[in-house]
Image (spheres, grey):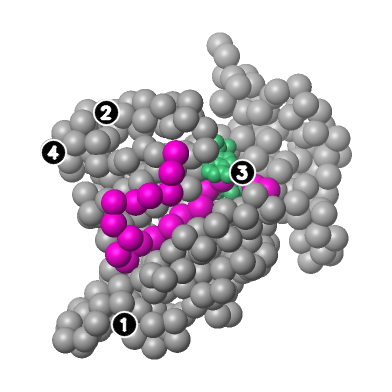
Amino acid sequence: MFKSILRPIIRQNNNNYYSSLLILRQLSSSSSSSSSSSGQSSPNRIDNVLVIGSGLMGSGIAQSCATSGKFQSITLYDVNDKQLGIAKKSIAKSIEKLYAKGKVDIESVDSAVNSITFSNRTDPKSTDNLLIVEAVPELLDVKQKIFANLYDQFKDNPTVIYATNTSSLAVKDIGLSVPVKDRYAGLHFFNPVPLMKLVEIVKLVDTSDQTVESLRQFVADIGKVSVQCRDTPGFIVNRLLIPYSSEAVKMMERGDASVEDIDTAMKLGAGYPMGPFELMDMTGIDTGKFVRDAWLARNDPSLNIASSELVDKMVADGRLGRKTGKGWYDYSK
Ligand SMILES: NC(=O)c1ccc[n+]([C@@H]2O[C@H](COP(=O)([O-])OP(=O)(O)OC[C@H]3O[C@@H](n4cnc5c(N)ncnc54)[C@H](O)[C@@H]3O)[C@@H](O)[C@H]2O)c1
């Protein structure tokens, strides 16, 4: 029912969006293609992408860019050479799987993988209309330092957009060292990136509409759907999901219902595709705890969550969900 109501609205918005972009492009074709720092000119299409951090998320983001075939250059940067090698292998394997299932429209697996430059330097082939997406671990000082260095490197280029993929830190805090606030935003992908369609665009007070439009176009170019939100804890999805998971754990800890029955209840009673415990196992018990702990540290009573000794013990014991074979359920059999 929701789908049938929503679809026409989404299609209409997309049409409006593309026609607005077309008009804006036509208007700008006679003038310079570079954006001004005032945020007044038309959105630039992203031509080049630099991803910082080649872990789970960074490699997924680079992979999605590569299979879209929409960019002049894609650079995947990491400080760790070994990790770059791992990323190359895992991207090749993942594209191969998607190709075999007919889920990506590419010339060949090799050409898609080779469209990514795996580098231990932040040196994209071209810096015109460059989008930088930072995806390094959730450590504020590390992220801040990265953006300070990147801004220093690209400060003379007014077409660079700076974005962070943070899940639990304030986007604003990460970007303190980026003076071009109109060209800085959050770009929150979901795991596994090649399969998950959603990207949250986090617009700060000073992020220009032009930057948001460029990011919307970028997300559409890689075959995903964007939503826009403000810089608040958890953005949209996690703000709803983390308290929901926390409440499910509390319910089970109180003995009100079992793990299995809570999952069954939410699937059959609320129409969710999986129950809260199945979802926690899929996203990683440690990932959930990481976000929860970051929220608890904020001491904000509006964030409706509680700590759980049981969850802490599961993480300490390495019961992290599907990825370790055991979480709320046992996947080892
Ligand atoms: N894992 C998820 O489910 C998920 C979902 C959405 C967003 N995120 C966010 O994405 C970001 C990355 O998460 P991840 O799960 O990919 O982490 P990860 O640990 O898998 O990868 C991080 C990568 O960053 C590299 N790195 C560390 N310091 C660096 C530096 N100074 N310069 C360049 N590279 C550096 C590491 O070598 C590693 O390869 C985090 O902010 C996280 O909150 C994660």
SS for tag 1? loop
Between label 3 and label 4, give the one nearer the viewer. 3
Q: In the image, 108: left or right of 147?
A: left
Q: Earlier in the sequence, mark 3 or mark 1?
A: 1
The image quadrant that residue 211 belongs to is bottom left
* Image location (x, y in percent) of residue 39: 42, 84
What separation in Å lies between label 4 and label 2 (alpha carbons)?
12 Å
- Location of mark 4 (residue): 107
Q: What amino acid does circle 1 point to?
A: Ser
- Location of mark 1 (residue): 42
Q: Earlier in the sequence, mark 2 or mark 3?
A: 2
Q: Residue at x 75, y 51 (%)?
A: 294
Residue at the extreme top of the image, as rendered? 333
Between label 1 and label 4, give the one nearer the viewer. 1
Q: Look at the image and say whether residue 241 sits in the magenta stretch.
A: no
Q: In the image, 114: left or right of 187?
A: left
Q: Earlier in the sequence, mark 4 or mark 2?
A: 2
What separation in Å lies between label 2 and label 1 (alpha carbons)?
37 Å
Q: In the image, which residues are magenta?
A: 120-139
Between label 2 and label 1, give the one nearer the viewer. 1
SS for tag 2? helix
- Location of mark 2 (residue): 96
- Location of mark 3 (residue): 137
Q: What kind of secondary structure does the magenta stretch mostly adopt?
A: loop
